Image (cartoon, helix red, strand yellow):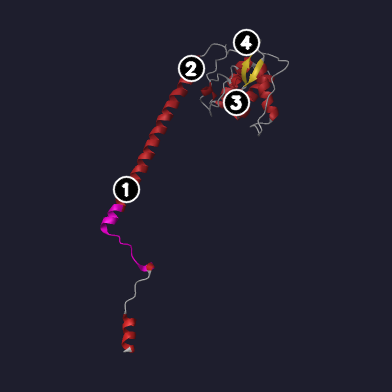
């Protein structure tokens, strides 16, 4: 009797280990998974298409704005508003406050750019800037450094934008060096245009230098 019970226990089928059990992938479940995957893929595709359309529309609008700015620049003949004040030596300039981090150029170069803008609006008023600051209403490189002047031409407040913009500083520095070398305003404008326009074709709507 004992031997028969032992044989039955030995012959009893054992359940398969959990690792060997198969998931019940019925045909209906497979179809449902395929439909879900297609739905997710369609949503992401449509989102990507919409983003591409929005980017294309934004680029088209920006191109139109840039073309309008370029066209306006070609027809500007009125002198810059502050050109009449230069050359203008100012006994005491407003304090120039530097940020608590490194500026794009050494402090002495930045300070020289601000000083040149304050003393020579008749030069930088005719020099365009290429950093995109026309969107902030700037008409020339002098606007990158000087925010306001008194009735006598003295600078009363600085424009902080030029403090942190490498392009603004470099354009002003180039103009300053050419001015010190004896170049005329027309020659300075031509040299700046030649140096910067190939890389940055859109610039501030800066008046042309009178002939």
- Residue 116 figure quarter: top right
User: Which is nearer the N-term, disc 2 or disc 1?
Assistant: 1
- Residue 149 figure quarter: top right
Quadrant in which the N terminus appears: bottom left
In the rendered image, residue 48, in percent from the top left (x then y), is placed at: 39, 39
Q: Is residue 25 above or below residue 162?
A: below
User: Which is nearer the N-term, disc 4 or disc 2?
Assistant: 2
Q: Tell me, yes or no, whether the highlighted magenta stretch contains residue 2.
A: no
Task: Please name the residue that numbered disc 1 is placed on.
Answer: 38
Which mark is nearer the camera, 1 or 4? 1
State how far apart marks 1 and 4 are (Cα).
68 Å
Residue at 38% across, 68% down = 18
Mark 3 crowd level (few <14, some 14–19, many ≥20, 10 Å Cα): some
Task: Please name the residue that numbered disc 2 is placed on.
Answer: 72
Q: Is residue 184 visible?
A: no
State how far apart marks 4 and 2 are (Cα).
22 Å
Name of the residue lying farthest toward the front: 1
Region of the chain picked out in magenta, as a range: 19-32
Residue at 37% across, 43% down = 44
Disc number for residue 84: 4
63, 186: nearer the viewer: 63
Which mark is nearer the camera, 4 or 3? 3
Mark 1 crowd level (few <14, some 14–19, many ≥20, 10 Å Cα): few
Given contact means CB atoms under 8 Å apart, are the residues at marks 4 and 3 in contact?
no
State how far apart marks 2 and 1 are (Cα).
51 Å
Q: Is residue 44 visible?
A: yes
Mark 4 crowd level (few <14, some 14–19, many ≥20, 10 Å Cα): some
In the rendered image, residue 87, in percent from the top left (x then y), is placed at: 67, 13
Disc 1 secondary structure class? helix
Task: Please name the residue that numbered disc 3 is placed on.
Answer: 161
């Amino acid at each position: 009797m004992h031997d028969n019970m032992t044989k039955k226990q030995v012959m009893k089928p054992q359940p398969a280990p959990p690792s060997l059990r198969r998931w019940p992938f019925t045909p209906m479940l497979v179809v449902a998974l395929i439909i879900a995957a297609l739905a997710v893929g369609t949503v992401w595709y449509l989102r990507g298409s919409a983003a591409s359309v929005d980017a294309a529309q934004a680029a088209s609008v920006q191109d139109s704005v840039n073309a309008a700015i370029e066209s306006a620049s070609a027809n500007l003949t009125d002198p810059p508003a502050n050109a009449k004040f230069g050359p203008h030596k100012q006994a005491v300039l407003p304090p120039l406050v530097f940020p608590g981090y490194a500026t794009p150029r050494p402090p002495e170069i930045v300070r020289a750019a601000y000083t040149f803008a304050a003393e020579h609006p008749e030069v930088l008023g005719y020099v365009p800037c290429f950093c995109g600051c026309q969107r902030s209403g700037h008409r020339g490189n002098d606007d990158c450094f000087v925010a306001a002047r008194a009735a006598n031409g003295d600078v009363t407040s600085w424009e902080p934008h030029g403090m942190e913009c490498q392009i603004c500083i470099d354009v002003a520095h180039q103009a300053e060096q050419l001015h010190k070398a004896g170049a005329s305003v027309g020659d300075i404008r031509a040299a700046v245009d030649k140096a910067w326009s190939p890389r940055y074709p859109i610039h501030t709507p800066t008046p042309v230098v009178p002939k």
